[in-house]
């Protein structure tokens, strides 16, 4: 989670224009995207490097956290 907040913030608002806002995104969408980064189906070197280390449980935790934040 610490690596996520460096770019996406604890409030889910991207720290810069190149980092998308994650707050309020749908849970299935966030899980799908994190798994796509992990398996190399979605290309973004920084995200792929971080997502590769996540377990399914960690992906679910991160996705749930950001999905519950309000826009």
Image (spheres, grey):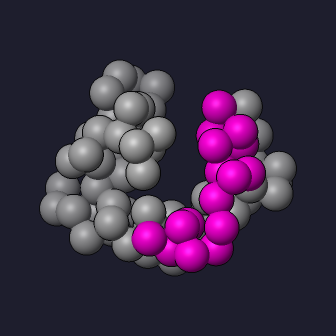
Residue 41 drawn above or below residue 44: below
User: In the shown orientation, is residue 30 left or right of residue 52?
Assistant: left
Residue 65 sits in which quadrant?
bottom left
Q: Percent x, y for residue 9?
A: 29, 39
User: In the shown orientation, is residue 71 left or right of residue 53?
Assistant: left
Q: Residue furthest right?
A: 40
Q: Percent x, y for residue 8?
A: 37, 39
Q: Quadrant of the C terminus?
A: bottom left
Residue 54 drawn above or below residue 40: below
Q: Which residue does the image show at 64% across and 59% down from the upper left?
A: 54
Can residue 36 be seen in the rendering of this structure? yes
Residue 18 drawn above or below residue 49: above
Residue 25 sits in which quadrant?
bottom left
Residue 38 drawn above or below residue 65: above
User: In the shown orientation, is residue 61 left or right of residue 11?
Assistant: right
Q: Percent x, y for residue 42?
A: 75, 48
User: In the shown orientation, is residue 49 left or right of residue 26?
Assistant: right
Q: Which residue does the image show at 38% across and 24% down from the upper left?
A: 17
Q: Which residue does the image show at 64% across and 43% down from the upper left?
A: 50
Residue 19 among magenta residues:
no
Can residue 26 be seen in the rendering of this structure? no
Majority secondary structure of magenta residues: helix
Q: Which residue does the image show at 33% across and 61% down from the upper left?
A: 66
Q: Which residues are magenta?
A: 46-61
């Amino acid at each position: 989670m610490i690596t996520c907040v460096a770019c996406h913030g604890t409030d889910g608002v991207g720290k810069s224009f190149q980092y998308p806002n994650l707050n309020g995104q749908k849970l299935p969408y966030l899980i799908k995207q994190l798994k796509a980064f992990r398996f190399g189906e979605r290309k973004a070197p920084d995200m792929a490097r971080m997502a590769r280390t996540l377990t399914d449980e960690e992906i679910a935790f991160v996705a749930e956290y950001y999905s519950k934040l309000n826009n």
